[in-house]
Image: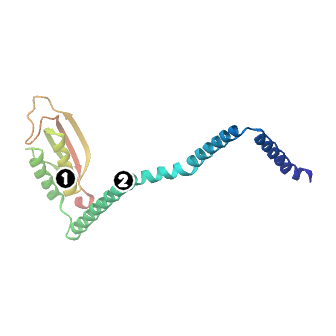
Amino acid sequence: MNARHSPPSSWRAAQAQLSAKWQSLQKRERTLVAIATSVVLLAVVWLVAIAPAWRVYTSYASSSQALERQVQQMQAMRQYALQMQAELASSTAGGAASPTAMAKAIETSAQRLLDTKTPIPLVGDRVTVRFQNVAAPQLLQWLQQVRESTRAQAAQVQLSRAANGGTPAAGAANTALWSGQVVLALPIDAAR
């Protein structure tokens, strides 16, 4: 039983000592101790309660704008996916394009964007496109167009930087020029 009552009695003893110490201080010292204690308490309240809430409040505008941009991007991607899904459904409903027709479409776009003159062979479900002295932006644009129009995927890419003496393809700026070949895999439904 004494063990249970010892903490309160020691607490009372500490409180009595503190009260006696407080009474022994002069008025000016009491004022300084009260001010110091108030400053420490205010600092603790600021650090524990106010500062975290203030950080959340001040960062809300920028974080909400970032989230809004992400939502818009996701909606745009969803719209693109729905569009691609509709195109896929319409192409399979009306019969998928033949591999020959897809190869011809790839050849036409390569002639237009990459300025290639060589015929593009179709072997099974693979189409090989060779090009010379093409700027990277043109090559990227062509790959994107081929992917969107035929859903063909690049299966193999061999690139080498063209010699400086090469003549740029139509519309190429003074950028690095590339030569090489791209092997495109036609969609599985087109190869059947």
Percent of width and height locating residue 137: 18, 43
Residue 20: which quarter of the image? top right
Q: How far is the residue under mark 2 from the one under mark 1? A: 33 Å
Q: Residue at x 22, y 46 (%)?
A: 183
What amino acid does circle 1 point to?
A: Val
**Quarter of the N terminus within the rendering:** bottom right
What amino acid does circle 2 point to?
A: Ala
Percent of width and height locating residue 131: 14, 41
Q: Which residue is mark 2?
A: 66
Percent of width and height locating residue 6: 87, 49
Q: Residue furthest right?
A: 1
Q: Residue at x 75, y 38 (%)?
A: 25
Q: Residue at x 28, y 65 (%)?
A: 82
Q: Which secondary structure, mark 1?
A: helix
Viewer-side residue, 123 vs 13? 13
Q: Is residue 78 left or right of residue 99?
A: right
- Vertical order, 69 against 169 (above or below): below
**Residue 146 got which mark?**
1
Residue 73: which quarter of the image? bottom left
Looking at the image, how many numbered discs can be counted on the residues?
2
Percent of width and height locating residue 30: 70, 41
Q: Residue at x 29, y 61 (%)?
A: 81
**Residue 168 got which mark?**
none
How was this image coloured?
Answer: rainbow
Viewer-side residue, 56 vs 161? 56
Sequence-first tag of 2 and 1 = 2
Q: Are marks 2 and 1 in contact (CB under 8 Å)?
A: no
